[in-house]
Amino acid sequence: MKYLMLKHYRGGPAPAVDGAPMDRWTPDEVDAHMKYMQDFADRLVETGEFVDSQALSAEGAFVRHDGPGRPPVTDGPFAETKDLIAGWMIIDVESWDRAVELAGELSAAPGAGGEPIHEWLEVRPFLTGVPGGTD
Amino acid sequence: MDASLVRELVPSVIGVLVRRGADFASAEDAVQEALIRALETWPDDPPRDPKGWLVAAAWRRFLDAVRSETSRRGRELVVDAEPPSDPGPAADDSLRLYFLCAHPALPPAAAVALTLRAVGGLTTRQIAAAHLVPEATMAQRISRAKKRIAGEPFDRPGDLGTVLRVLYLVFNEGYGGDPDHTDLAGEAVRLVRQLAALTDDPEVAGLLALVLLHHARRVSRTGPGGRLVPLADQDRSRWETGLIAEGVAILQAALARDRLGEYQAQAAIAALHADAPSTAETDWVQIVEWYDELLRLTESPVVRLNRAVAVGEADGPAAGLAALAAVDPDVPRHAAVAAHLHERAGDLERAAGLDAEASRAAPSVPERDHLTREAARVRHRLRA
């Protein structure tokens, strides 16, 4: 079963821990955080559960059609108050419980003072492309 | 079996098919199919005459394709099944393919893909993997590129400037890219080297020197976990001195011909870096002079930005910041350069803020992470 783990720049439930932004950590804390993320992905490759991951720029805009012969309408840059996706990891795991376990681990990445950042991650099951059940 | 041997034969085999009467698009498809077959079967059953094998296999596939197309359309076969025997000059074929694949009518991404397949002899799957797109998508990109240049004469010289831009693009894709994927930088070096052997143009030599000098530093550019190591912090003992010596010799011969162009000027800057034991011992004054030459040749905002960095090293951060004031702030990496210059000028508060801003605008993960570390490092200095 595939799951999408979505990381947000902002949005989601109220932060459990209101930590300082990353550029205010010490260089060693930044390194420890990045190593944790890298090791996490490497470990999922090892266990055969990693599918894909991608980081997204904070830039961009909402776009929609505005009628024939007219250029699309854009709404951006994103307002400070809006939810903003920072990136994702796709995992292929045995169960929902395993997906939750892994998201919990990822959310425990160390931040300032080496303490877990407790960041909220959004976990979403993929809809499969094939109908299930027995006919 | 040496896969690079098969790949080197690809352009000349395409040339043979075209001169036998095949159109470029069909010839290129047939050779790609023959290439894939060769990669599958040669390891167990190597042919005595590799080129003859490829020509025969590709010609057979071309005829099959023509026959099925003919029967589909109910038209007569227009190509003789028995090929004429003329093998023709292979070097000219390769050069013509460079021009055709980098045709100015093609968008850069399409020219890159077509060049890698028809000149580089890479398979669609390898090209797709290197660009992180599905194989079917890459196949379509190549097929559409070929439709776009259908009817372009195969035997006419094209625009060398476009060819150099495409090859430099391939190199840069590989240089900044994931080393686990197809080695595009190494492939670009091979393609530029081959082009330099086919032409007598100082700018081709300039590009060859440039890619060799950059390629020599590649292992020192990344640290553990793929983290970016800036030039100032690179372990220079890991630079490949053989490639540097070759690049410098090629550059000197090109410069001696007194027909300066942007690639020679960029290679001259790369050579000055390659020659220096450290950032502090780098001849920044001469680098600034080369940037001035480059500006006369290109008037590029990116060059102007890099020149500001060099001015900062040659004449101090205040002069660097003055040079930066003339650069459009929307140029990518502007904030990162400003951060570096403000830090050297002693304004740590401003530098840390600019590093954080630069990390938010960074176009790649390694740069973003590097700039986040820089912001953290400068803030740490501020507190200390």
Image (cartoon, rainbow, N blue to C red):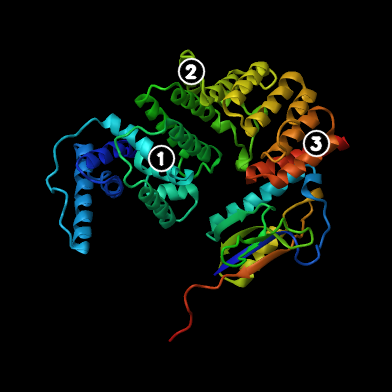
In the rendered image, the residue lying farthest to the top is B256
- Residue drawn at point x = 19 percent, y = 39 percent: B52
* Quadrant where the image shows the N terminus of chain A: bottom right
SS of the residue at dot 2? loop
Q: Which residue type does callout 3 highlight?
A: Ala
The front one of B320 and A97 is B320
Kindly report the distance in space between the C-alpha atoms of the residues bearing marks 3 and 2: 41 Å
Q: Which residue is mark 3?
A: B351
**Mark number displayed over residue B215:** none
Kindly report the distance in space between the C-alpha atoms of the residues bearing marks 3 and 1: 44 Å
SS of the residue at dot 3? helix
* Vertical side of A126 occupied by B12: above or below: above
Q: Which residue is mark 2?
A: B259
* Vertical side of A67 occupied by B355: above or below: above
- Residue drawn at point x = 78 percent, y = 67 percent: A13
Q: In this rendering, which labeled residue sits more in front, label 3 or label 2? A: 2
Q: Which residue is mark 1?
A: B103
